[in-house]
Amino acid sequence: MSDSPAPIPGMGAMPHDGGIAFRVWAPHAKAVSVVGAFNDFQPTANPMAHEAEGFWYADVPAAKVGQEYRFWLDIETGPVTRIDPYAREVTSSIGNGVIPDPHFDWGDDQFQIPNWNELVIYELHVGTFNDDQPDVDAPAKFESIVRRFDHLKKLGINCIQIMPIAEFAGDRSWGYNPAHMFAVESAYGGPKAFKELVKQAHKNGIAVILDVVYNHFGPSDLDLWRFDGWSENDGGGIYFYNDGRRTTPWGDTRPDYGRPQVRQFIRDNALMWLEEFHVDGLRMDMTLYIRAVDASASQVLPDGWSLMRWVNTEVRKYFPKALTIAEDLQNCDAITDTAENGGAAFGSQWDGQFVHPIREAVITGADEHRSMEAVKNAILCRYNGDPIRRVVYSESHDEVANGRARVPQEIDPNGASNWFAQKRSTLAAALVLTSPGIPMLFQGQEFVEGEWFRDTVPLHWEQTETFRGIVRMYRDLIHLRLNKKGSSKGLTGPNVAATHVNDDSNLIAFRRWQDGGPNDEVVVVANFHRDPRENYSLGFSQPGTWKLIFNSDWKGYSEQFQGYASADVTAVAGEYDGLPNRAKVNIGAYSVLIFGQA
């Protein structure tokens, strides 16, 4: 019998009462040591024992939390050192791993994400969201986000979606080039600062969804590349496909979804964010390139499909309320179908069938070229028969870059102060916040941020004052979407019917309801024409007074708006639009009205 303690389970650097245990997967290495500040980086001091299936293990009593370390590997071409693939912290993308401190004071954090049908998501980029030191050549940090929570809370936001924070090359990036999957970007403040951000978000009633990237790694500053020296066909080695399946739009670094150790690596990463950092959900980047080799999806990757299904099943098992979102954009029901039905089991997916027709409808210059049929289809679209299976938006980091700009800028390149830009961009936003699905805004959208998204250009927060009326409009719409005043419950419900679609007049109307009846059903009317509509007949489900609870043309929202004389209406018996009652409404140019019945 050996007196040596049993190996500690897990991967990477694992603090325990007797020191730090280390484990790494390097099946083709001839020998492996752990080197660090605890042994002056000497490879002979702490050799690792070879375990089954290519794993190596060592327990180092002298190692301590906070010390830097690496793995030393003797490979076919000679000794190399590598950053721990499971490192929770690194000094930089090309530096050393740091032994993590597992202890963090979460206080009484028992936060639960709101019901999915009551979410309003706000997508943000850490480095540019609130750069309160714009003269310093460095990205903003996690702590800067907290200083804008009052703004987000007043707006009504109850969930932030953060673009990727896994350590990437350099200090500025969108985040979709992860070099170290388990390490939190050091330029943003590192792991402790991210935990503090999540803690403060929860204290303020705000859920946190994190963007993760599993369709490729890197491609630069990537110690995973030929990690233990082995590769085939000039490929990347044990973590990657080494044949034609390796190729992605971002480099030849698609993970090998068929290797059990790589599958476990990705699964462990997803669960880490939920368990160790208390995030409330994950948004998985471009899942098309996980389930298929190319954009046409002509070469399917069954291992990618099963990986996504497994990760989502594991998330649901351990964190039943967590929301997982796919960016797939291929209108694929299987993405959000259940594991039992062979689907990928995501909770929701970004909806390309909403964003593209809605943007086109408001960006198109000539009114006669707007399609109300396309707008109707965008509003009614759903996946798996459930509207919550989609996230709807008119702006996201993808939609406002890569050759495209913010909606106001697309409408008028000369500036967001233009009447057309303000009217039609808010028309799109009103449809985002009144259509079925989980609504999402992109940072700065509420104060008409212009141009296009770049990771070097911070938001212009002074515009919250310049466009304070537009900010108020977003707030009013979000409060209606969340039924804050008890008069718009239908906007949280699953039911929708397009009751009036008129291409000639550029006008559409639709009903939203949960159970039906007073204080539930709402009627949304949208005018996509530059001319107002007066005494315009529409059908209503119930007779009596319908209160006007929102008018986007109110002059309080913008001095440029006309304040068209819209008002409550009284529906009387008489079939119209297939409904038993009718009323005449007045609606301003490029405007949205919402009616409710108390």
Image (spheres, rainbow, N blue to C red):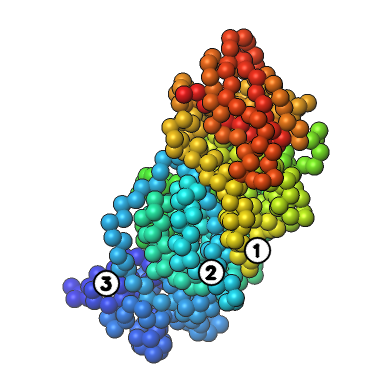
Distance in Å between CA atoms under marks 1 and 2:
17 Å
Q: Earlier in the sequence, mark 1 or mark 2?
A: 2
**For the point 60% across and 43% down, which residue is it?**
556
The residue mark sitting in front, 2 or 3, is 2
Q: Which residue is mark 3?
A: 16
Q: Nearer the viewer, residue 169 or 469?
A: 469
Q: Residue 81 location in percent, x, y?
A: 49, 81
In the visual, does 261 lie left or right of 562? left
Distance in Å between CA atoms under marks 2 and 3:
39 Å
Q: Residue 578 location in percent, x, y?
A: 63, 14
Q: Residue 293 location in percent, x, y?
A: 64, 53
Q: Which residue is mark 1?
A: 454
**For the point 41% across and 40% down, which residue is it?**
115
Q: Earlier in the sequence, mark 3 or mark 1?
A: 3
**For the point 68% across and 53% down, which residue is it?**
406
Q: Which residue is mark 2?
A: 132
Rendering quarter of residue 361: top right
**Mark 2 and mark 1 in contact (Cβ < 8 Å)?**
no
Q: Amino acid at mark 2?
A: Asp
Distance in Å between CA atoms under marks 3 and 1:
43 Å
Rendering quarter of residue 17: bottom left
Q: Amino acid at mark 1?
A: Arg
**Mark 3 and mark 2 in contact (Cβ < 8 Å)?**
no
The residue mark sitting in front, 3 or 1, is 1
Q: Give the secondary structure at mark 2.
A: loop
The residue mark sitting in front, 1 or 2, is 2
Q: Give the secondary structure at mark 3.
A: strand
Q: Earlier in the sequence, mark 2 or mark 3?
A: 3
